[in-house]
Image: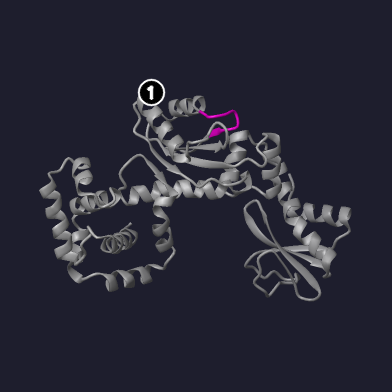
Amino acid sequence: MFDLKKIRDEIQTTMGLSLAFYAENTRPDGVRVCEKHFERVTDDGEYTYFRFLYKNVGYIGILEGVGKETTRYALLLPSFIESFAERDLELSKTDHLKRILKGESSSMAIYKYATKYSVRDRACFVIALHIEKHVNEALSLLEQYGGNTLDTVLQISDDTCVLVRFVDEEADEGHSSMDYADFLVQSLKEELGLDVQAGVGPTVKELKDVAISYAGAENALRYADVFNQRGNVHSYREFILVKMLEGIPESKLSEYLTELSESHVKEIFEDEEILDTAECFLQNSLNVSETARNLYMHRNTLLYRLDKIEKTTGLNIRSFSDAVSFRVLTILHRLLCQ
């Protein structure tokens, strides 16, 4: 087992550097503390400071001296230090990949994984699948349907599995990530009778960015649940507006909702039947006939509900601009009530 003091001693012995460290957001006695806010490396004219993670805890490293050579060491040492923690871990391929997806692996560990499993410089994307039962059987089936030997299936939680798919430009030509997710969902339905929800993350150029795709896939699943989105396959692209608004403080969201709506609009928000009808109408590109068909609803009933929304909110969602405004209002309401 390594600890930071032993790592520091080894660095000082092998590299001839004077190294100290302290945990972020602390002010320990006897250690030079950096008073600046910085991202990677900075200095105060006498000492060079750098940030690093060790076993998922943030630290500030301190090197005596300043200049180009010291800065180079400060840039290299984080990966070097993090690698010691990973030497203590004997991880399987799936456990290693799980750490990468969750952003818990150093750049050096990701490089080693990519090299060992021949996925360097390969574009990839993540499909997250919410599976409520027969998870083991679903995992086995997903492994059989993997598009190539590089793809990896793993279980993230009791009801969530993930497929990391590495793009094969020739085999995947003409097929999108959404097409592939839909194929998996249909296969699980036909083979195991499972009604599965899938979230698809963006395609990234290489493995070091796969955590971004995983976050997008997870968010797509979460937002689809919060907003009662129809269908079984959801893309992160569907919820870009939601993600933008979610980053706004709750107090500001409440202010926007008040400014954009009349007091009696609450009547619509409390009527789930009306909201579901409106959501389906928006998803069907404001097409009355298509929406009525998908809802198994008479056209006149649908028009009555759309008229009710207009009378209550002042928004005619059959027009594009009012539909956008109504969509923003419903997102604000869902975010404040989730």
Q: Secondary structure at mark 1?
A: helix
Residue 103's spot in the image, x, y percent?
59, 49
Query: Which quarter of the figure is the N terminus placed in?
Result: top right
Residue 250's spot in the image, x, y percent?
38, 67
Q: Which residue is mark 1?
A: 191
Q: Is residue 253 left or right of residue 2?
A: left
Q: Quadrant of residue 149?
A: top right
Q: Tell me if residue 335 is in the magenta stretch.
A: no
Residue at 67% across / 74% down in the picture?
Answer: 36
Q: Is residue 95 left or right of residue 156?
A: right
Count all numbered tags in the image, as a single digit: 1
Residue at 63% across / 40% down in the picture?
Answer: 122
Q: Nearer the viewer, residue 10 or 99?
A: 99
Query: Which quarter of the figure is the C terminus placed in?
Result: bottom left
Residue at 20% across / 49% down in the picture?
Answer: 288
Residue 301's spot in the image, x, y percent?
11, 49
Residue 304's spot in the image, x, y percent?
11, 54
Mark 1 surroundings within 10 Å by alpha-carbon count, few (fewer than 14), some (14 through 19), many (20 or more): few
Q: Main secondary structure of the magenta part?
A: loop
Q: In the picture shown, does residue 186 fall above or below 88?
A: above
Q: In the picture shown, does residue 262 fall above or below 107?
A: below
Q: Tell me if residue 148 is in the magenta stretch.
A: yes
Q: Is residue 118 left or right of residue 337?
A: right
Q: Nearer the viewer, residue 232 or 336?
A: 232
Q: In the picture shown, does residue 247 fall above or below 88?
A: below
Identify the colour scheme used: one colour
Q: Is residue 138 left or right of residue 85?
A: left
Q: Of the residues shown, which amino acid type is indicated by label 1?
A: Glu
Q: Quadrant of residue 165?
A: top right
Residue at 74% across / 47% down in the picture?
Answer: 2
The span shown in magenta is 146-153
